[in-house]
């Protein structure tokens, strides 16, 4: 279930209250910090809690908050091939160049913050801006070659939700988002507190937190991230057979699945036909240009592969010696 924010909620009256300092993070181990985060929704969780994070589903976040995430893929913060590693390494550099660009001084705030009225709302902020009347928080981001496309039209929605969550928890007025694009271009965006959006954000996050408190899984949303979560939750089958022939709800879901598959099959066949018409006209040409784009049809480089069938036939003893087993995965098969 993905939520959508709409500027239609009533305004929250009164001056926002300052955040509580829940835990000091200086000297806190990563495991202890993760345990604190498990007790609430942090700012980096906000978009996932609403089903609006392109990298994490509600179901994955629910698994993390309920301690069911042991089999989920984990990001290694020391792996220098991941955006997480480079984001942490470059954060101080981004903060330094933000100060050079804007003239605003910043400092670390080594604490997990807690909303004064909603104790399940937590926040870590990268830096607080010192001595500025118009902005109080700095969020540092980095985006590589591929991630930079998400910033073409400004701050991505999932980052906006993260920052609005921070403003909700801290009671502050505004935050700057400084992003380093492609390792060489720094851009700064201002996000101002919006009471209507904050009111709706709190309501929707509280709805998600209800799933955590009830130990009830939120519905899967069709994303790849939700599929990963389901495979981690239910890696093996037990052989049981469920008879849903008299269950109108699940029978309706199955009927909808069949209908969607039929439409997809029709579109897949049409796609193949259109592609083949282009290929037929191209002949031996490598590229074709159109009003709205282009296609290429080129030979890939020669690839050398191992003839395993012949190897097994000629050297069965070697195959036995170097054979490794791999856990099977569940296949979802639809039969009409």
Image (cartoon, rainbow, N blue to C red):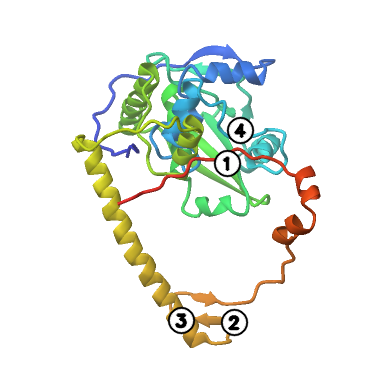
Quarter residue 265 falls in = bottom left
Which of the two labelled residues, at mark 2 and mark 4, occupies the earlier sequence position? 4
CB under 8 Å between discs 3 and 1 = no
Find disc 4 in the rendering and name its residue: 74
Cα–Cα gap, marks 4 and 1: 26 Å
Cα–Cα gap, marks 2 and 1: 42 Å
SS at badge 2: loop
Q: Nearer the viewer, mark 3 or mark 1?
A: 3
Which of the two labelled residues, at mark 4 and mark 1, occupies the earlier sequence position? 4
Q: Count residues near mark 1 (Cα–Cα under 10 Å), then give few for <14, some for 14-19, many for 20+.
A: many
Find disc 3 in the rendering and name its residue: 278
SS at badge 1: strand
CB under 8 Å between discs 3 and 2 = no
Q: Position of residue 277 (x, y in %)?
A: 43, 82
Find disc 1 in the rendering and name its residue: 178
Cα–Cα gap, marks 2 and 4: 41 Å
Q: Is residue 248 above or below residue 112?
A: below
Q: Count residues near mark 4 (Cα–Cα under 10 Å), then give few for <14, some for 14-19, many for 20+.
A: few
């Amino acid at each position: 279930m993905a939520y959508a924010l709409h500027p239609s909620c009533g305004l929250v009256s009164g001056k926002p209250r300052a955040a509580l300092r829940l835990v000091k993070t200086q000297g806190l181990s990563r495991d202890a910090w993760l345990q604190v985060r498990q007790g609430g929704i942090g700012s980096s969780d906000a978009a996932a809690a609403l089903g609006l994070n392109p990298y994490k589903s509600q179901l994955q976040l629910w698994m993390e908050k309920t301690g069911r995430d042991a089999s989920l893929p984990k990001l290694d913060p020391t792996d220098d091939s991941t955006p997480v590693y480079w984001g942490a390494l470059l954060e101080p550099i981004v903060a330094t160049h933000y100060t050079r660009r804007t003239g605003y001084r910043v400092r670390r705030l080594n604490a997990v913050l807690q909303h004064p009225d909603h104790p399940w709302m937590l926040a870590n902020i990268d830096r607080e801006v010192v001595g500025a009347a118009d902005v109080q928080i700095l969020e540092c981001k980095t985006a590589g070659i591929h991630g930079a496309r998400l910033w073409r039209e400004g701050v991505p929605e999932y980052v906006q939700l993260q920052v609005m969550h921070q403003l909700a928890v801290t009671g502050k007025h505004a935050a700057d988002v400084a992003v380093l694009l492609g390792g060489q271009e720094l851009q700064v965006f201002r996000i101002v507190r919006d009471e209507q959006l904050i009111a709706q954000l709190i309501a929707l996050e509280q709805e998600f937190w209800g799933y955590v408190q009830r130990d009830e899984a939120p519905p899967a949303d069709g994303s790849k991230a939700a599929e990963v979560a389901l495979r981690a939750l239910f890696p093996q089958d037990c052989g049981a057979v469920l008879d849903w022939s008299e269950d109108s709800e699940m029978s309706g879901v199955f009927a909808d699945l069949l209908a969607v598959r039929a439409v997809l099959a029709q579109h897949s066949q049409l796609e193949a036909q259109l592609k083949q018409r282009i290929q037929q006209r191209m002949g031996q040409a490598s590229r074709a240009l159109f009003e709205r784009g282009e296609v290429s049809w080129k030979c890939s480089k020669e690839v050398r592969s191992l003839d395993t069938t012949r190897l097994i036939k000629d050297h069965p003893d070697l195959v036995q010696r170097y054979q490794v087993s791999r856990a099977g995965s569940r296949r979802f098969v639809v039969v009409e």
